[in-house]
Amino acid sequence: MVSIVFLYFFLPVFIAVYALAGQKYRPVVFLTAGVLVACWSSLWGLLPIAVSMMTGWVSALVSVKCSKKAAAAMLGITVALNAASVVVFSYSRFYGADLAGILTGHSFPFAGIVSAGSGLCALHSISYSADVFFGKYERERSFIKTACYIAFFPSFICGPVIRYDRIREELSHPVISYDKLAEGIRTLVYGFAEKLVVAAPLLDLWNRISGEKTENLSFASCWIAAAAFSGSLYFDLKAYCDIAKGLGLMAGFSMPDNFNAPFACGGFNELIRRYCITLFEWFRDYVYRPLCPKRKSDSICLPAMLAAISASLLWLGLGGRYFIWGFFFLLIITLEYITRKLLAKINHVVRAIFMNMIFLGSMPLLIFPSSKDALSFIGRMFSFSGLPGDVYIVYVVKNYFIMFIIFVILAFGLARFVKTALNQLNPNIVRIVQPICQTVLLLVATAFLAVSPTQGFMF
Amino acid sequence: MKKTLNLISIAGFFIIVVMLGGFTVFRARGDLGRIFSSGADAKQTASDLAQGYFPLDTNWKSLHTMITRATTGSEINGIYSDDQRLMRVYPDYDKGRAFSNIGLINNFAKRADAPISLILAPTAAGVYQSGLPDFIDNTNQLEIINSLYYKLGKGVGAIDVFYPLYSAKADYIYYRTSDCWTSLGAYYAYEDLIRQLGATPFDLSNYDLEYADESYYGELYQQLCFKDCEQDAINLFRSKNGSTVDKVTLYDGDEEIEARSVYFKSALKTDEKKDVFLKGDSFTRAEIDTGSQTNKRLLLIKGTYANTMIPFLLPHYKHITVIDPDRLKAEGKTLSDAVDYDAYDRILVLYDCVQFSKTDSFDILR
């Protein structure tokens, strides 16, 4: 999605055709655009999307037309087929991990096929089927609109995950308004800038430092490298979500925020609620809560949480490191829960600093394929040695100082804070500044795209 | 006011997007058919066309360089930039291939009658390494050249040009915007080569300096469009005794070009003005007859750096044959298909040490 072809050719043509189509035909145009985006990745990528569409549609139909038993069986089949679709089509994207490869040493025939949207379509299909089955809302009678929701192409790359009831009305009457279009353009351009100007250089910094042998790095370089990786991961995910949100708004859909300044949290329980919010809510509502229906409001159910975390990590990809990182996270959340009364007495800023230190300290578990390398890196981070003669500190201070300032301003929600304060002072200031910023960021993003025309999803 | 500003936002965005996108399509109109005819590669073709024909190319590059230098430092896409010059840095050096090429030259020396000399010149990043910040990952070219020379067998003489260039590093010996030495840099290397071969090089005072072009922007500049970097000058050294060239014949496949000079001034009207020296790397073989008093014949197996040195070698040889191994290999020929290498008094292999580690064309010596 982050390419010259998308921004300068696909987008204007899509918006023009979508606007001219009129409300009646807009879902068809939207679905066609989704199919084209999937085909751009790979023609085979249509297969998992078709599986998700058909299972979602049939499951909802069976829920209404057939017996409860048949509907439950169809829901089970829907979950199984979508999970299988994710395993076959989505996992091979992530670090080459695929289930068949791990279990049998032979990859799936489709391994390596980049199937944009297969992971998201599966989540949409399951949540739609389950919600209709449990009577949360009525099924959508139009196949096109169901398909539009399940294959909601703006969210293809990494979300946000949307609930059908949130966009049902907008799918029925897709209206392009000036407010939404302008807001959508701003959000989209901001997403492009985040991806190109912040996420990609931070990943370069991580690659540069991690290319050095761990024993040659000082503890400070290791922390900076972990921060760079963490920042690039966050901004890459957030950028795609902002692009998705912007594109959705341009087409008339209100989409939820997926991030809410997670690095400013005072603890991990809060962090998981503010980092990939829609993904957290999906696994909470469709894995955690069904497994733990009678929980008290302030308690946590460890087995259910373990299942939810495992499922979410499985959704991200197969591989030992995801499980190790997931179990570490579960351990931290449990410890935090046990000591919550004690932690409540500590100042929020101090808690936020500790939370970020632990989060960064856990990053190597997620990054390194080998646990040995990860533990060696973590050991170096906490060795507090090797600082004299460390060239990377000089390098980062000299070259990445402004980048880290931008990182902090954006990741800790300071930009949003300033915007809110200015809005309260005089909303016209923000309104006047916004088109200027939008144009500058569009030109900057274009400059980066002109040099590197296609920027893939990093993770 | 809100509605007005929203309209401005929308109009501004679509004006920029439609203008740039539309202009790209207009420029690419002749090639658009390729997208549909390229089958499975249609996606790649479309992306390539979009990038290739996207307007304001140099402005975007310049803006990208400016922002990247401000936010993440002075090394962009492997090119280090400071106020003085642009330098391509080489963090990864293919030692395996370089040593393999040395092995092929050693084997060739066993078969060849003529003595062989090898010049591995450092690039600017090798000579100016001490000026690079510590955190810039760059191969130590002096160490590499020495280790390669150490592996040379009997019959191959190593010509050290690193120190002459290093001693003259305050002079204009490398282009500021290109990864190649200037005529002056080539002269210092020539001086050392001729001395090490036991002859006397011509002094600089024997040459008139012709300022052929003073607005050369090399390939490094074309990649970054870094506006703070000063343009280069193409200088030609003309012998005060007049040209020694009788005839130059360039061969490229079946094509043959004849000239009376090793300087091809038509190249000064193109972007690659450096090609003024024997048309750059655009020929497979060149035969140069000179009016030199000697009867010596030189076979020059050349990398890009050799082009600039050839004018200085002319007075020392009656006939020079220049061979580009990459192009010869591309034609499916070996050295013995192209020339009788035993008919020469000396064989000179002249490469910069980076190109030497990248080429896989030395198997033409087999």
Image: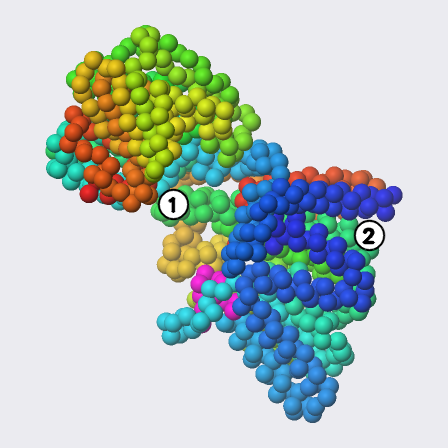
Labelled pair 1, 2 in contact (Cβ < 8 Å): no
Report which residue position mark 1 lands on: A212
Magenta residues, as a range? A89-99
Mark pair 1, 2: CA separation: 51 Å
Query: Which mark is first along the chain, 2 or 1?
Result: 2
Q: Is residue B10 above or below residue B298?
A: below
Identity of the residue drawn at 72% across and 88% down: A65
Q: Chain of mark 1?
A: A
Identity of the residue drawn at 42% across and 48% down: A210
Dividing the picture into quarters, in which one does residue A428 lie? top right
Dividing the picture into quarters, in which one does residue A164 lie? bottom right
- What residue type is disc 2 on? Tyr
Report which residue position mark 2 lands on: A178
Answer left or right for A415 relative to B160.
Answer: right
Q: In this view of the protein, which residue sits in the foreground, A426 or B320?
A: B320
Would residue B329 be counted in the magenta stretch?
no
Q: Secondary structure at mark 1?
A: loop
Q: Is residue A409 above or below residue A356?
A: above
Q: Secondary structure at mark 2?
A: helix
Answer left or right for A282 relative to B9.
Answer: left
Q: In this view of the protein, which residue sits in the foreground, A128 or B333?
A: B333
